[in-house]
Structures are given as C-alpha cells and as structure tokens.
Amino acid sequence: MSRPDAYIGKPIERLEDLRFLRGRGQYVDDLECAGALHAVVVRSAVAHGRIRSIDTAAARTLPGVHAVFTATDLGAKVPVIPVRSESQPSLDQAVQPVLAHGKVRYVGEPVAFVVAETAALAEDAADAVTVDIDPLRAVIDRAGAEAGDVLLFEHSATNTAGRFTGVRGDAAKAFAAAPYVRRERFRVQRYAPVPLETRGLLARWDAHAERLTLAGAAKVPFWVRSVLAAMMALPEQCVDVIETDIGGGFGARGEFFPEDFLVAFAARRLGRPVKWIEDRREHFLSTAHAREVDCELEIACRRDGVILALRGQAWTNAGAYIRPNVASAPRNIAQMGAGPYRIADLHMEVSVLLSNKTPTGSYRGPGRFEIDFCRERLIDLACADLGLDRAEMRRRNLLTDAEMPHALPIVLPHGKGGELDSGDYRVTFDRCLAEIRWDEKASLQGRLIDGRYHGLAIGCYVEGGAIGPRENARLVLDSEGMVTVYVGTSALGQGQETVFAQIAADALGIPIEHVKDVFHGSTTCVEEGFGSFGSRASVMGGCAIAAAAEKLKDSIREAAAARFGCPVSAIEIIEGMRAVRAGELQLPLHELAGRELAAEGTFAAEKRTYSYGAHAAHVAVDPRTGQVEVLEYVAVEDVGRILNPSTLHGQALGAIVQGLGGSLLEELIYDEHGQLLTASLASYLLPSMDDYPDIRAVALELYPSPLNPLGAKGGGEGGIIPVGGVIANAVACALGDLGVQPFELPLSPPRVWQLIEDARGSRRQAQRTAR
Amino acid sequence: MKLPSFDYAAPSTLQEAVSLLGAHAGSALAIAGGQSLLPMLAYRLVAPSLLIDLRRVPGLDAISVTDEGVCLGSKVRWCDVESDARLRTAHPLLAQAVTHVGHSSIRNRGTVGGSLAHADPAAELPGIALTCDAQIAVAGALCPRTIRAEDFFLGPMTTALASDELIVELRFPAWPAARRWAFEELARQRGAFAIAGLALYYDLRDAAAANVHIGVFGAGPRPQRITQAEAALNGRVIDEQAIAAAARTASATVEAIDDVNASAAYRRSLVGTLLERALTRAAQG
Amino acid sequence: MRTTLHVNGKLVEVDVEPRLTLADCLRHELRLTGTHVGCEHGVCGACTIIVDGQAVRSCLVLAVQADGASIQTVEGLAGGDALGPLQTAFRRHHGLQCGFCTPGMLMTAHALLQAEPEASEARIREVLSGNLCRCTGYVGIVKALLDARSAYARPHTREAR
C-alpha cells in the first residue's frame, strides 16, 4: 500500500447507520412485493409421536386460502436438509425432512404449510388443520437419550448420533502419574441466540425464465443456494439467494431451515410470490437452539499449579435432528478444552445425543463458551484444593509468545488439528487484572457487605477466527473514480459495509466517500462466497478486498505501461484512482480503461487466527434471595489488528451482555413431555438496559496474525466465551464461606438460593455425622 | 401471531357498552388500554367475537382523592397514577407499587380496569387492592354492585366479574397520614413478572402495630393476605424479634406455586425475606 | 373499518380489519416499514412509536383504537434527509448494530428526552429497559442519549405543553 492507512484502525462512523437511523433499512418483511401470498407453518404440538392423519380439508375451504401442503404433496421423496459442517455418516442418518412424515420428533416441527392471501388468513387456516398424532414417550435429556429404550430413529439402534474426540499427547499416562487430580460434572443449559428480528423469506418464481429468487438469506447464502437448487432440481445458476438487511444472527439464522425449501416450493407451485415471516413464538420453537451440554471434566496438576493434563466426556443435546451446523459445538468442546493454557495432554470425548427438543445449531462461541465454563470452574476448584492463588495459577499456565505457533489437539474422526497462531496470553491477562483492580479488590472476596457477599473472578479464552477455505471480492471502478465493492461474506448487523469500505479505501488510496456501495452476501455479488460465521467475515472478506484492490491496481499499471511504453514500475496511480502518470505523461483513467474497470480477488486460508483475552468480574450476591448483581465486568482482548475500534468495541460489549444473559437469565425450559415452557419473551428473558450497567471492554493489537496481510484476527465471539466461567467463579468466590460451588448455568436467583440451601443442608449433615 | 378475527365496537356511553356486553355475553370482551389483552389475542389464548372498546365512554378516567379515600376510574392509566402528585400522600403504597408495573411504554396505555379484570397472579394492582381492602365497583345489565377485592380474585386470570359486567371504579379506603407501609418485589429484571411481591401497612397505637395488613402477589395462584402474620403482629412493637417471627410465619403459611420461574420452596423463603425487609423499612418510617 | 390517523404530520385514512395492529397498519397499509415488529406481544419494544406525545408499543394497539390519534414514527423523527440530534448521537456513539431495535429505541428515547431533557443515566436505563437490543450491550445507546440531552434542553421552562 502506497500510503499509511487513513481509515483502517480509525473509529469511522458506520455507513449503514444512515439508513437504519431513518427507518430505511430493508429487512425481509419490509420488501414490497405485489401479489405476494403469505405462508404459515403448521407445527407439531406433540414432541414425539406417529402421525395418524393430517386433515387439511377444513383449512382449504377457508376464505383466501390458496394451498395447504403436507409431505405427501412434495413428491415421492421428501427433501432432507443436509449437514453443512463436520459431517459424519451417523450424523447424516438423523437429518430433518422439510415436512414431517411418519413421525414427529419435536414440538414445533413443520407438518403442513398453509398459503393464503394474508398472514392472518393463513394463520386462521393453520388453526383449522387437524393433526392426529399417536404420542410416544419423549426423550428429554442425556439419561433418556442414553437409556435407548425410546429411539428417535428406529432404524438406528441408538440416540447417539455422532462422536468427536479431541486428542493431544497421552492423557491417561499423565493422569496416572499426576500428584493431584479432580473430576467434576458440569452442565450448561439450553438457550439460544434470539436475534431481535425473527427469520423471514420471500420467494419469487419466474416461470418464463425458470428462475427462483429467495430473499431473506443470511450467514451462508451460497450454501443455501446449492442445497435449494438440489432440492428443487434446478441448476445453481437458476437460483438467486438474496441477502437483505438482517436483524442479528449470532449463529442461528441463515442455516438451511425447512422453510427455505417450503417457501420456494410454494412460490413455484402456485406461480405467485410467497412471503413467510416467522413469529416470535415459532422462533422459540423452530429456530436453532444451542448450548445444552453435560460435561465431566478432570484436571491433573502438579502441586505448584502447573496443569499437566485434561480429560473428560461431554454430551451435547442436539435436539431432534442433526441440522446443518449442529457439529460446531461438540467439535470445539472436543478440541478447545485447554483454551489458552499450556496443557500437554488432553483427551476429550464428546457425544452428540438426539432428543425430542428443537434441533440445535451454532451460537456465538459454539462449544467454546461451554468448555470454557467447565475448565475455568475446575481451575478455581483446583486452586482451592491446592491452596494456590487463582490469578497466579492461571498466569503460570498461560501460553507465551515463545511458544507460538502452538499445536492444537487433533479432532477425530476427521483428524484435523490446527495451531494457535500468535500472541502472549499473559499480556491480556495482566491488563485485565489491572483493569478490574484485582489486588485492590482482593480483600472484598467473600466479604459480607450490607447483606450481600462480594466475589471476584478472572478467566481466559481463545477465539478461533478467519475460517477458510477462502473468500472472494470484486471491485468495480467507474470513470468518476467511484468504487463499488462486492464480497462473498454476509453481514448480520456487525457493520461490515463500513469495515469493508475502510479496507477498500485504504487499499486503493482513495477517500472513503469514493466507495459508492458495498454489496455482500447475495449470490449475485460474486461467483462464490462463504458467508459470515466463526469470526471470519472481516478478516476473510477484508483480505479478499485487499487482494482485489492489488489486482485492480496491477491491471491499471499494466495497461498504462503498455499505453505509455514504459515499465510497469514507472506507473503511478494518482488523483484517487482517477488518473495515471509516468514521469511527465499523464492520462485520465477513463481514457485508459473506458467506462468501468473491475478486478476480482481471493484470499485463501488453511489455518485459523486466534484472538485471545481475559475477562474479570466483581459480583455481589444476596444470600437471602439468590440474586446476583454484576457490579463490574471488564474484558481485555488482543485481536491482532483493529480494523475499526468502534465496531470492534460494539462486538465485544454486545457479546459480553449475551454471555451475561446466558450466565444469569436465559434458559429454554422443557417439561417431561417435551413441551417448551418458555416460548415467549415474557418467559425467556433477554438482558435489558437496566441489568448490566457497568461493563467495559479493552481491545489491543499486540500480536498481529502472521496468517493474513492485515494481521487481523476475528473479534466477534471472544466477548461471550469466558463469561459463564467468570460469573460462576465470582459467585463461588462470593459464597465461599457458605460452601457453595455452582456447576450449572444459569445462576438465576432460585438456583443460587437452592445452592445455598443445599450447602447448608450438607453442612448440617456433616456436623451431625461428626458428632 | 396475527390476532384472530373479531368485530369491534366503540360505544359512547357506559350504558351502551354494558348492553353490548350483555347482548354478546360470553363472547364479547371489553378493551381499554389492551396491554394485557393484546398479548392474549396474539397468542390466540382468547377468541372473542366482539371487542368493546371503552375509549369513547366518558367518566371512567378520573382519579379522585377525598376524605373517603382514593378512587381510580377503570380507564385510569398507570402513567396517570404516576404523575398524580396527590397520590404520593393520599396513597403512597399504591403510588410506589405502580412504578413496578411493566415498562413505561406499557404504563402509558395499561389501565386499572384492565389489570383487575386480567387478574394475573403476578400483577401488582390486584395485590395492592387486596392488601388495602379495596372495593371494585362494577356496572352490569342488572344493577351496579360493589365487590370486595377479597371476593374478586378467584384464581389465575379468573375473577368474580360476570361476563356482562364492566369494572367502573377501584375504591381504596382513606389512608391516614401517619400510616407505616412498605412495598417489596422480586422480579428477575425490571418489568418482568414478579416471582413474588409483598405490600404491607399498619397504624401505630401506643408504639405498637395495629390494623396490620400484609398482601402477597406472584407467589400463589392469586393475591393473598398473610393473615397469621398479621395477627401475630397486631398489638406488638415491630422489633427484630417480631419481624423474624412474622417472616417465619409468612414463609410457613403463604400459598406458593411451583412454576417455570421458581419453586414453591423458593417462593416461601422469598416471601419471608420480603416481609422481613418490608417490616424493617416500614418500622424505620 | 374506516380509521383516520395523523401520521408524521399527515392526515391519512385507512380501511382496516379490526384485528389489524397499529404496527401492521403502519408497516403494511401505509408502507412505513421503519417501525419494526420483534415479538408481537409487547415485550421487545422494537415497534415503539409515539402516539399523542407518549411512547407506546404499536403491536399492543389496534389500528382502530388509534382512530383520530396523532402518530410519530421513526420516518418522522428528522426533518428531511439529515439526521436529527438524537440520530446523530446514536451514530457517533455506535448505539446500533443490526438496526432492528433502533427505531423503537429512538422513539422511546425521543419521548423521554422531550419530557425529561435532563434525564439521568439511571433514569435512561430505567425507561429504556423496555426496549431490547441483542447486539450492542446497550453501552453506546446510553451514551447516545446522554449526549443528545443537550439538544432537548429547554432554556426557560420545563412545561412541555
């Protein structure tokens, strides 16, 4: 790059804000479409059962109803939704049909699809569909799944759909020789990303051109296109999947859901555009849930706190079907147990269990949040056993710059490993201790002040980012020197348009105002794209844009060199991409290249980047009510290179508050029949503005990633990963004198109160026994 | 979550509203602010054939403060209660409780009558009405009647209101200036449903508590008085010992439910804690 | 039913089914899609608009109930194309990410600051706790409101009406 960065690293105000702040965003339900029909999904009210009959006759006769589809309308073979990542043959055995047939396996499973003139009429008709189901016993939890007397898929002999095993060194040997070991059971509850905009789709079928357009896609539009094209027996180039403005994703939204097919199918069958907007109740029943995991984790240490090995087993409750991205969490649990610590030997086996609950998917920091909670809790327990300082023990085990790159455990069955790329994990840790004033607050630990116990905790994490395989971008330069950016990553509200405009402007040496527009996600933007997940979009998309910029400049230089008859090295691009010069010779760009110039760039990555950091919290716990107040929460991260400090800060703060929600508030609760009891925002609580007022995030750029020219690492997920462990450790610290040790989230007032009651009970018991 | 189909009428007199209700008895519902009814409609938990909007009915939106006490017309909104400075002395318990109802934009439309008729066990106003021996004046096809709060709330979302009756007014007895009182509530976050809440007041006679009223909402299937704790406190000086004993009694005698928010055991303990805190606060004056 | 609304200063007449919420009326009948619908049961606050000077949830109002009412939506928050002071503050302090909760936040904030231009941080957090945002963690939104207060300050009198 010919000049120092003018935009990268600066808190550039967001370009997308200009439309969002004036109510001009275009979310999928905002799209106007003349003649569009509206669809509503009829969902199973029973968690597990055999479908005896579906009576649609009454619904079909209602006013305004155009069609009621059931599985029998979909042809001889009902399409199934394939696994997108980390597939295994056994996982592929448990994929979801787009409409249930034969059996239903969760409350909320689509059994019919109603299309009518308006959404209200469609809902009236959906109410008139009678689904007769012969109920079977529901599998709810690990015990039920492992018992195996009730099977979700009778053709399979087990409810265990797959297994991931993380291996490094020889854990068995290390444990056999270790002077100290401790094993504990942990549980992370089922909860969900719950973006504020529900899912929605608008499909149009152009019969003349045999072309399908599906708007409302997010996250992985290119993958959705390839799946949809296959299901509809269309060539991929006849399907356009269009990304609209998206009201938040956080992992759940944009994977292939049954509705992606159903809406498209109905539009083609009926020859009319069809719109479907998920309502909040069905969002809770149908969009991917996440997290629910039982884990037994065991740590082996020397008496001085050096961690020798980690091993254990975990069971993720995947829900009723293996959806496209069920596997990220178990895979990461298997691999990332050691987190940022130097732990030579690791063995972690993770089973993926089926149950009669809503299928799960990815949620920000998948698997990492869960295993971080278990490991950080276990470290605090080990500290207590060994009489070690919690900060000192962590510091002793954190990886340093000299140990980079650091090989990660191999994950079976695929055998993939990877390595931590760069960083000194003690630096963010020390900064975090300073930010929370750890030493100053040390005397507060466990103290009762005005009726509340105070507690302090710190925890660490690494965040995998910039996942490959590659990403593509195209830059188009017009004769006015205005640039349009097209990129294959998606935007879910993070501010990608701004960050990409910054990168493009710096790469081309133009004012950011000359970046006319940034188009992302849609399959019409570039030939091939990979989407937005795993903290990849800014790094991968950004590097692809930078690569495209270099190609664009190269092609201009080559053309100018040919025109001027001089070497390429003599060519200068000047006036903000509007002219070229070689010595005395100068030419406006449009005379050299005509109306428009374009270049494409690709950035490929085989290895992932790893941001890292530490979080600390100070809490106060009311022992009478079990209420936990977060008095202060601090996060420090090193992201290698900060592209836009303002949007990065927003990612960190937003992720922290989501983590606090998952640690203290949010839970999807089922009864024993598989009914979801929290299918409204009145019963499923999201953090509000009043809940966690004192949170801070500090971003550093100390150790750039060696893996990409920007030096950037992903930054979207780190804020959530360690929160559960930090909060639970802070509560344990606060209630240390009462003997309370939380092993399960969320730490709601009733749960904390129950822990205190149980601890009192067991102390009384112990005293009685002692006597 | 589109609402089911219904007809709509906006009568301009109470008489007309009552006769419409009578004519569609059982299938018509009255709507004022709609802050409880619209979510029920959205989840299709109710399917009325007719909604009778009271917005044009005059005379139901007054707050009156007299020597007899405080009267709230059924169309009085939470924000009206909040902004009426008289109530801070005329009925401080009511004024305080109302700030816990939902969020401010809910309080801009939600009404007294709507909350009473909805009878959510976790709602503040039914709890206050019961605690304070309030009376609910209703109009119906036959003749107007007054229902005591203790006879009004029958169970979750169930009241003594007949299907052709409308709430007209909520009447609180006069509030002596020297009265001691407190309000305590635990919800998991601001605006969320209370896991339990507690309101109490008493008057001082020769330094001892008299006329003790303790009401609890959110803990059981309907608002309830903690009569044994009231009896134990009447005639006693409210000191640490009395408070502790009353809290134990409240925990032991409160009717508590298990639900998705909390266990009955938690609620019993919580009610004791809330009572202890409320009494301590009230005793401080 | 024939219903008359004054929306962002304009008188409009619509013919709606009684069951249509004001939110859906604004969005689909009047094509004012800036008002977003996040839950349809009155919890998330995304659909908050200003009706007769007060912030209300347009998913909890029937369009027919608003007959004759004066309504302000996010589209009417700034005059013309420029951002108003509240919107500018949201942008400056990164008070939005995906933008879905933003119109409801803006309208709740606008009603609050009009009534209480000196609202404290605690008061802001209290009043806006009825508007959920899943992206920002709220820090930028609070800063934006604190910053925007000066634009709402009334030099002479605290009486609004």
Image: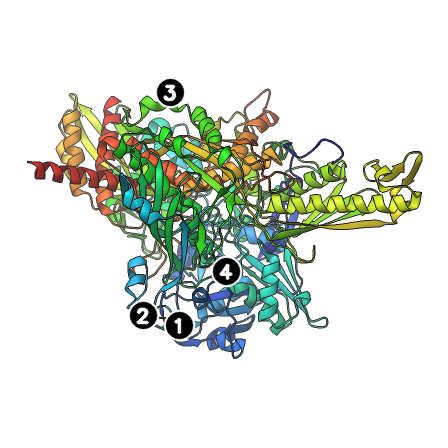
Instruction: Report the residue marked by disc 3.
Output: A440
Horizontal side of A11 relative to B224 (left or right) equals right
Label 4 marks a residue whose chain is A
Mark 4 surroundings within 10 Å by alpha-carbon count, few (fewer than 14), some (14 through 19), many (20 or more):
many
Disc marking residue A324: 4
Foreground disc of the pair 3, 1: 3
Q: Residue at x 81, y 47 (%)?
A: A555
Instruction: Report the residue marked by disc 2.
Output: A136
Mark 1 surroundings within 10 Å by alpha-carbon count, few (fewer than 14), some (14 through 19), many (20 or more):
some
Dot 1 amino acid type: Lys
Alpha-carbon distance for marks 2 and 1? 10 Å
Of mark 4 and mark 2, the one earlier in the sequence is 2
Label 2 marks a residue whose chain is A
Of mark 4 and mark 1, the one earlier in the sequence is 1
Foreground disc of the pair 4, 1: 4
Alpha-carbon distance for marks 3 and 4? 48 Å
Q: How is the image coloured?
A: rainbow
Q: Position of residue A494 (x, y in %)?
A: 58, 43
Report if the CB atoms under discs 2 and 1 are less than 8 Å apart: yes
Alpha-carbon distance for marks 3 and 1? 60 Å
Foreground disc of the pair 2, 3: 3
